[in-house]
Every structure is written in structure tokens, then in C-alpha cells.
Image: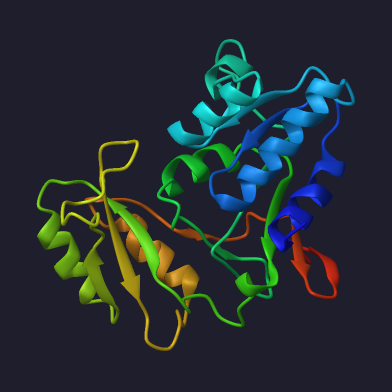
């Protein structure tokens, strides 16, 4: 198994029959979904339902025979739904288990689903570990209306912000019919919490790829084995 498969295989040990769980997006989570499907087909697990974080994940889960449900369907009336577990990958993981996510283009739905999880597991290979967030681009989802103005504002925050384009030059469109921007920070993000507040307050910014104080456990596979990193 490659490192991503090793992390996914370890994460499956946290899944119990009868769980309703969030199914993350990305290449590492794809392995997890395939392993989960195998366990369901063999009868080792049963009565599992998943809430997908992207249209692509929903399609994969259906092909694999994993039952799907929406958050709203989980709780009758006005109750706030709660997932037993959510499993997803990450683009960056810092020592406090804060994350950069969203380079798989699904950050908004990922954050919505994972904010309803009683326990959130991140699976990754060791290349995702960083000492400070912002070693790579931070994805941000924005509305198409006046997109250029939002990008100018993002550039005023001390980063280099660019509209994320497809190979043909057209803007990437998310499952939510929005645009994505990638922001590069030359020396990393000095204060992720302040940046998250600034982005949350900006009209036109729908969501950002900073997942702060959300992770309960990171399962990180490396050449020397699998590490378990729990939030302190």
C-alpha cells in the first residue's frame, strides 16, 4: 500500500456499524471510501450512511454502494444534526492540527459537513505536515459577482491572490456555482485566526480553507509507519 492507503486503512478501524459519517473529498479519502465499501460488501460493517462533501464524492459513493443521506434528513424537526464521524484529507496540517483544505475544490461543503461531526479524523501522508500554515496556496471560495474586486481586496492582506483557472483559461466553478481564488503567503500565514476573522467579515467571500480547532485526530502515514496525532 502507498502512504495514502495506509492512512485510510488505519482510519477505517474507527468506523463502527450503525454510524452516520461525513465522507470527505480528495485522493486520500477516495481510498477510504473504497475500503469502506469493501467492508460493507463483506458484511464486516453494516448500516452505514454517508453525507458526501462534493458531487464527485457522492457519485463515487453511489458507484461503491454506500448509502447516502443529507444532514437535514438526519434530525427531524428543528434539531441540529450530528454525525458520528467525519473522515477527510488535508493539504496542510500544523502542530496544533489546524488545517489548510480545499485544493480538491470542495472546501465549503467539507466545512459544512465536518462542523456537524462529533469526531473529525484527518488522513494524510507525512508530506502534509508543516510547521506553519500557508506553505502552499490557501483556497478561498468567492461569489462570481465583482470577483475582480474581491481578488484586489485579498491582495491587500499581504498575500498574492489569483483567480483559480481551468487549463483552458476559464474560472473554476465549484459545486456551489462560485469561483475559487488561491492565495500565496511568502512566509506562511502569521496569524490564521485573525485571517479567518477578516475573511469571514468580507462580503463576497463565501468560505476559506482554514479549518481551525476542528480536527480531533490526524492519522499520518510515513516511511516509518503511521502516526496518530490527537488534538491537545
Instruction: Please name the residue shown 52% across and 35% down the image.
Output: 57
**Which residue is nearer to you in this view: 78 or 168?**
168
Is 14 placed above or below 21 here?
below
Can you give x and y, in whole percent of width and height, for residue 177 in the image? 26, 37
Q: Is residue 18 visible?
A: no
Name the quadrant containing residue 87: top right
Q: Is residue 96 visible?
A: yes
Q: Quarter of the image containing the C terminus?
A: bottom right
| Drawn side of residue 2 relative to residue 111, left or right | right
Q: Residue furthest top?
A: 77
| Drawn side of residue 198 relative to residue 144, left or right | right
Instruction: Please name the residue shown 61% across and 54% down the image.
Output: 89
Q: Quarter of the image containing the N terminus?
A: bottom right
Is 78 placed above or below 28 here?
above
Which colouring convention does the figure follow?
rainbow
Q: How many numbered marks does the figure carry?
A: 0
Is 69 placed above or below 27 here?
above
**Which residue is nearer to you in this view: 168 or 143?**
168
Can you give x and y, in whole percent of width and height, for residue 102 in the image? 45, 55
Q: Residue furthest front?
A: 1
Q: Residue furthest right?
A: 44
**Which residue is nearer to you in this view: 108 or 42?**
42
Is 212 placed above or below 61 here?
below
Can you give x and y, in whole percent of width and height, for residue 165 in the image? 23, 57
Can you give x and y, in whole percent of width and height, for residue 138 in the image? 40, 67
**Which residue is nearer to you in this view: 180 or 57?**
57
Name the quadrant containing residue 77: top right
| Drawn side of residue 93 relative to residue 179, left or right | right
Instruction: Please name the residue shown 9% across and 52% down the image.
Output: 146
Amino acid at each position: 500500500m502507498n502512504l495514502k492507503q495506509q492512512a485510510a486503512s488505519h482510519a477505517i478501524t474507527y468506523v463502527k456499524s450503525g454510524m452516520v459519517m461525513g465522507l470527505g473529498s480528495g485522493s486520500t479519502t477516495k481510498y477510504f471510501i473504497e475500503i469502506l465499501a469493501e467492508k460493507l460488501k463483506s458484511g464486516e460493517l453494516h448500516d452505514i450512511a454517508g453525507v458526501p462533501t462534493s458531487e464527485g464524492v457522492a457519485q463515487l459513493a453511489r458507484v461503491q454502494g454506500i448509502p447516502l443521506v443529507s444532514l437535514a434528513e438526519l434530525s427531524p424537526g428543528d434539531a441540529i444534526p450530528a454525525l458520528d464521524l467525519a473522515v477527510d484529507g488535508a493539504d496542510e496540517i500544523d502542530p496544533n492540527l489546524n488545517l489548510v483544505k480545499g485544493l480538491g475544490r470542495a472546501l465549503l461543503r467539507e466545512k459544512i459537513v465536518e462542523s456537524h461531526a462529533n469526531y473529525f479524523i484527518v488522513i494524510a501522508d507525512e508530506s502534509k505536515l508543516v510547521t506553519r500554515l500557508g506553505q502552499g496556496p490557501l483556497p478561498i471560495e468567492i461569489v462570481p459577482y465583482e470577483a475582480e474586486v474581491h481578488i484586489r481586496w485579498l491582495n491587500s492582506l499581504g498575500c498574492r491572490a489569483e483567480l483559480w483557472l481551468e487549463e483552458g483559461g476559464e474560472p473554476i466553478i465549484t459545486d456551489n456555482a462560485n469561483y475559487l481564488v488561491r492565495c500565496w503567503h511568502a512566509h506562511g500565514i502569521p496569524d490564521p485566526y485573525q485571517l479567518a476573522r477578516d475573511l469571514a467579515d468580507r462580503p463576497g467571500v463565501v468560505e476559506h480553507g482554514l479549518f481551525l480547532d476542528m480536527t480531533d485526530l490526524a492519522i499520518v502515514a510515513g516511511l516509518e509507519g503511521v502516526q496518530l496525532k490527537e488534538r491537545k
